[in-house]
Image: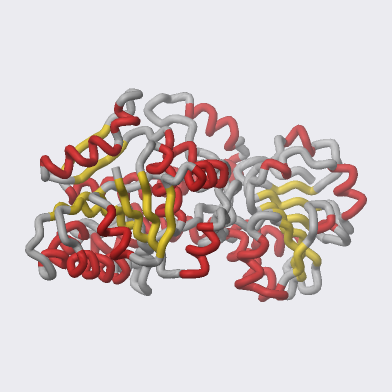
Amino acid sequence: MNITIVGTGYVGLVTGTTLAELGNTVYCVDIDAKKVERMKQGTVPIYEPGLEEMFLRNIQAQRLFFTTDIKEALDKSKVIYLALPTPPGEDGSADLSYVISVANQIGEMMTDYKVIVNKSTVPVGTADKVRETIAAKTKIPFDVVSNPEFLREGFAVEDSMNPARVIVGSESEKAQEVMAKIYQPFTNTGIPIIFMDEKSSELTKYAANSFLAVKITFMNEIANYCEKVGADVDKVRLGMGSDDRIGHRFLFPGIGYGGSCFPKDVKALIKSGKQEGFDFQILEATEAVNQNQKIILASEIEKYFKGNIKGKKIALWGLAFKANTDDIREASSLDNIKILLEKGAEITAYDSIAEDNVRQILGDQISYAKDMYSALEGADCLLIATEWSEFKNPNFELMAQKMKNKAIFDGRNMFALEQVEDKGFFYKSIGRKTLR
């Protein structure tokens, strides 16, 4: 089938490449001409493990194309996926201006039946708005479908090729048949496709992400309580996760959640609720707790240095909001950097993948190291903000040689306590005893 993807951000590019891998001919549209040209030359504009190989394979197989001409792509395709930004406004609501703008263009340009698929995360009722927008421009029949994505950054290729389920919101039998055909390679292997109405589909995405944000935040609250009473959050986590009603995933404590999805989606659902006169009290609490959790170790660092960190050299391992991505949106590292700089600390950071993105924001406000050990030169302490695998088994002897003061503040519980216990480090992690 011929498919157009409008928008080549994270969701659009992964979706387009996946659909090409499933045998479709895919036309990816973006208004950024330089970006389109780079992609034509085989350059992947985002970091995602496994994506480049699949991307290049489908370009070579002539199943994946890139263009700035939406009319050209529209004319060639029966199905149009909208994978456009829906950034949060100042009040937390999702900005639908990009989605509505493209819907207007589609209405003006379409010449035959199309299935318009909302892939972006959008508030309940967006499918209706897209439908109304297009219908105001054309009398040609079309259908609007909600088909939310459930991709984890860092595992997006795995998730896109092996989804737990496919959600399709449409009450049109014709559109359902088209979507069933697209996803037949999945259903052939036992992956379920769940059909529902558009509004339920739209809410399913927000509900899923918000629930996971709540789960993470609850575990962080338990971790902080563990420290008060002398319990070990690792043991509590294992005990909880062994209950198959709960499961082990998203139970790892740390310095809060970030990224492009959870913060935005929690805010948007809170705002959507208020527009209907409904208060998501649990989500409002989750948002507040998470914001405090992100910077919980900054206060611990200040306490360690008896309230004065001016002039202290702090090494920072990790800048991305999580491992295996270059995404720094809502990253805890940035919140900590802001506070520590305001208090007069000097920061040297290492993250080989996300460094360039941070440079674009912070410039030379902090220093950047070529490797994890170089960041430790003369450091008064180390703060770990991202769980990159290269940090899991460091050379503690080399760390001790490099650092001026042997203190580690671990926001991702990278080390088992036994790893650090006899190394002579002060070691503060989340929800576990502090080693002194």
Is 390 left or right of 290, judged from the image as shown? right
Is 137 left or right of 244, judged from the image as shown? left
- Residue nearest the viewer, comparing 161 with 67: 67
Residue 154: x and y, percent? 54, 45
Among the 4 quarters of the image, the one containing residue 151:
top left
Residue 61: x and y, percent? 47, 42
- Residue nearest the viewer, comparing 145 with 252: 145
Instruction: Give the tally of numbered discs.
Output: 0
The answer to whether any part of residue 11 appears in the image is: yes
Is 45 left or right of 8, judged from the image as shown? right
Which residue of the protein is positioned furthest toward the left in this rendering? 139
Q: Residue at x 66, y 75 (%)?
A: 342
Among the 4 quarters of the image, the one containing residue 4:
bottom left
The way the protein has been coloured in the rendering is: secondary structure
Residue 165: x and y, percent? 32, 34
Quarter of the image with the N terminus in it: top left
Among the 4 quarters of the image, the one containing residue 303:
bottom right
Q: Residue at x 10, y 56 (%)?
A: 141
Q: Residue at x 64, y 46 (%)?
A: 387
- Whether residue 328 is situated above or below residue 78 in the rendered picture: below
- Residue nearest the viewer, comparing 198 with 23: 23
Q: Residue at x 20, y 41 (%)?
A: 178
The answer to whether any part of residue 223 appears in the image is: no
- Residue nearest the viewer, comparing 51 with 342: 51
Residue 236: x and y, percent? 54, 32
